[in-house]
Amino acid sequence: MSQKTLDVVRGIAQAAANAYDGAHDANGEPIKLGLKREEGNPITDSRVVDGFKVRVDGNKLVVLYQSDIKLRDVYSTNYEDVINSTFSDIVKFLKKEYKSITGNALSLSEDGEPDIMIQKTSKVRVWCQATKAYKIGNLDGVVDRLEPSEDRLDSSFREFLGLGGLGKKAENKNQRAPQK
């Protein structure tokens, strides 16, 4: 792994770490990510459980968002649009925070649709988990782990396999004839 790749991964990890619940910026203001937990008064209102985490998988950044929501919110709106909006807010924050940490721009492009799973917790609440992958443009020399591997056998080993020693029985000239 090159030093540039390591710096990109470390910058992404630090940007995501700066998004913890209750984080403040340099001016002492609460950081706004666009998550539901930021709405309302934390003392008098019931807290909404939601958050995200990231992982790097080859040349892709996978963002996992989880939230505890009410069942009526799922049915009242097009919830896929809400999730896509949340992902765009998270990516916007990560890019901005990465730029402030490293001084370089982070290039992320969508790689497919989000995978959303909603599970019933009770008759009123549901648990939502969604993942979405983004291609990282700043990584050099990192290949996607899902790409097929190429044939890189050494020529001497390939020649050995071509002899076919496992399929034939070795001839022994000094072998006795089978007895009847």
Image (cartoon, helix red, strand yellow):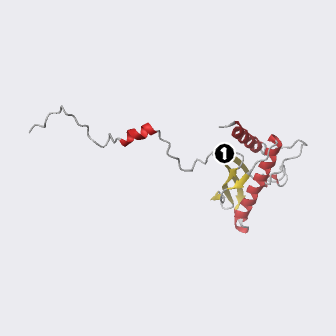
Q: Is residue 134 above or below residue 103?
A: below
120 left or right of 82 in image: left
Residue 107 x, y percent position in the rendering? 74, 50
| Helix, strand or loop under label 1 | strand
Instruction: Quadrant for the N terminus, please.
Output: top right
Q: Residue furthest right?
A: 27
Using the image as rendered, state which of residue 48 and residue 52 is in the foreground. 52
* Residue density around tag 1, few if under 14, some if 14–19, many if 20 or more, within 10 Å: some
Seen at 70% across and 38% down, the residue is 6
Q: Is residue 92 above or below residue 153?
A: below
Inspect this view and state whether residue 162 appears: yes
Using the image as rendered, state which of residue 173 and residue 64 is in the foreground. 173
Q: Residue furthest left?
A: 180
Inspect this view and state whether residue 22 appears: no
Seen at 71% across and 55% down, the residue is 109
Seen at 13% across and 37% down, the residue is 178
5 left or right of 98 in image: left
Seen at 72% across and 46% down, the residue is 138
- Tag 1 residue: 56
Residue 106 x, y percent position in the rendering? 76, 48
Residue 140 x, y percent position in the rendering? 68, 44
Give amino acid for label 1: Val
Residue 24 x, y percent position in the rendering? 85, 43
